[in-house]
Image (cartoon, rainbow, N blue to C red):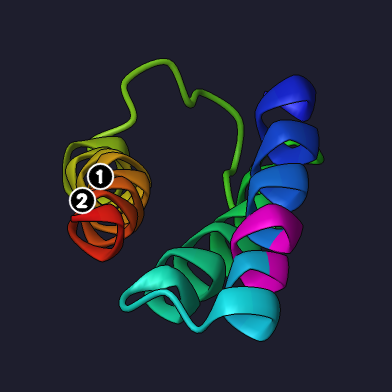
Amino acid sequence: MLMASVIGGILGLAFLGLWLARRVPGSWLAALGWMLYAPYEYLMHLRVLCSGECNIRVDLLLLWPFLLFTTLAVPTRYLMARLRERR
């Protein structure tokens, strides 16, 4: 869980940098998602948001599809836009 929050923070900063540098559509949404997920996951690790038995995390069924979609969609849109510029 701790590693997930570190990776989430890194991805959030990477997508924020992509938004600030290139204004890639959707990158601000991916940055926001990862930057909100990282402290949330860290608080789950500290058992602040979880009162003990957190073996079954139903919240991840909602969070991970969103994070996965934005993480894959943003680079795809960026690369497709770059390919269109070259033509």
Q: Residue at x 32, y 78 (%)?
A: 25
Residue 58 percent across, percent down from the top left: 22, 36
| Number of residues whose C-alpha sits closer than 10 Å to that of mark 1, classed few (under 14), some (14–19) or many (20 or more) | few
The reply to whether residue 17 is in sight is yes
Q: Main secondary structure of the magenta part?
A: helix
User: Which disc, if any, is residue 33?
Assistant: none
Residue 44 percent across, percent down from the top left: 64, 43
Q: Mark 2 sits on what residue?
A: 80
Q: Residue at x 25, y 49 (%)?
A: 83
Q: Residue at x 77, y 45 (%)?
A: 10
Q: Mark 1 sits on what residue?
A: 76
| Most foreground residue, 25 or 36 | 25
Give the residue at the far top of this rendering: 55
Q: Residue at x 60, y 30 (%)?
A: 52
Provide the residue span drawn in magenta.
13-17
Amino acid type of the residue that numbered disc 1 sits on in the rendered structure = Thr
| Most foreground residue, 32 or 60 | 32
Whether tag 2 and tag 1 are in contact, CB under 8 A, the answer is yes
| Most foreground residue, 42 or 50 | 42
Amino acid type of the residue that numbered disc 2 sits on in the rendered structure = Met
Q: Quadrant of the N terminus?
A: top right
Q: Quadrant of the C terminus?
A: bottom left
| Most foreground residue, 16 or 83 | 83
